[in-house]
Amino acid sequence: MKQELLAISERLVDISEELDRLTDENDEQAHAILVKELRGIGDTLVDYLKTAEDDDRAFIHFSLGSLCSMLGYHNQAEKSYLEALKQWPDHVGLLNELFDCLMEQKKYAPARDIIEKSILHGGETPIILQNYAIVLAHLKKLNEAKVVMFNCMAKFPADQRSKELLSTLEGNG
């Protein structure tokens, strides 16, 4: 089963990249073909879930979460990510995908908790700190968001997106 799950995981990454490209190109027919493939992969993952245990089970839930997110089923994606977190509570990639999913649903308080766990386990990067500042801003904690971005700028002075976000938070963007 592990080989099949790895192959599925790799295909999900490929499909995600293809969907991003197709969105830019407005190719609805090719998009529909990929969505149909995603649904088939989802059926396969659900079948595997019936007999999977431990890490395989967590891996399947993580993959289902990613798949559901790509299809726009954020509520179901959240449930799958939370199931995977039971086995992998400090998996940074999983935490980051759950964060994105919660933000899509405008669940800002839980998103803040998740991004803080991601920082704890994976450290600070410009993107992670930007996400943290954005969720703080949504929670009406603008001063905290600015502090996060000032710290981000101190650690990553060349990051242009951080400069732009800080400018926006200060009302200059």
Image: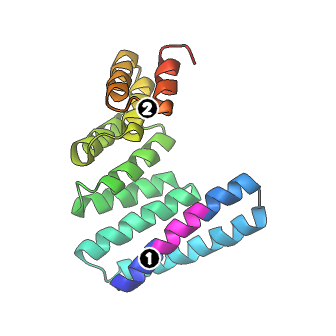
Q: How far is mark 1 from mark 2, CA to CA?
A: 42 Å
Q: Amino acid at mark 2?
A: Ala
Mark 1 nearby-residue class (10 Å; few <14, some 14–19, many ≥20)? many
In screen coordinates, is 27 left or right of 100? right
Disc 1 vs disc 2: which is toward the camera? 2
- Asked whether disc 1 touches disc 2, contact meaning CB atoms under 8 Å apart, the reply is no
Residue 144 image point, x, y percent: 33, 20
Identified by mark 1, the residue type is Leu
* Residue 138 is one of the magenta-drawn residues: no
Q: Give the quadrant of residue 81.
A: bottom left
Element under disc 2: loop
Colouring used for the render:
rainbow
Name the residue beneath numbered marker 2: 158
Q: In the structure shown, which secondary structural element does the residue marked by tag 1 occupy?
A: helix
- In the image, what residue occupies the spot 42% across and 33% down? 130
Report the magenta residues as a range: 10-17
Residue 17 lies in what quarter of the image? bottom right
Of residue 130 and residue 139, the one placed in the foreground of this image is 130
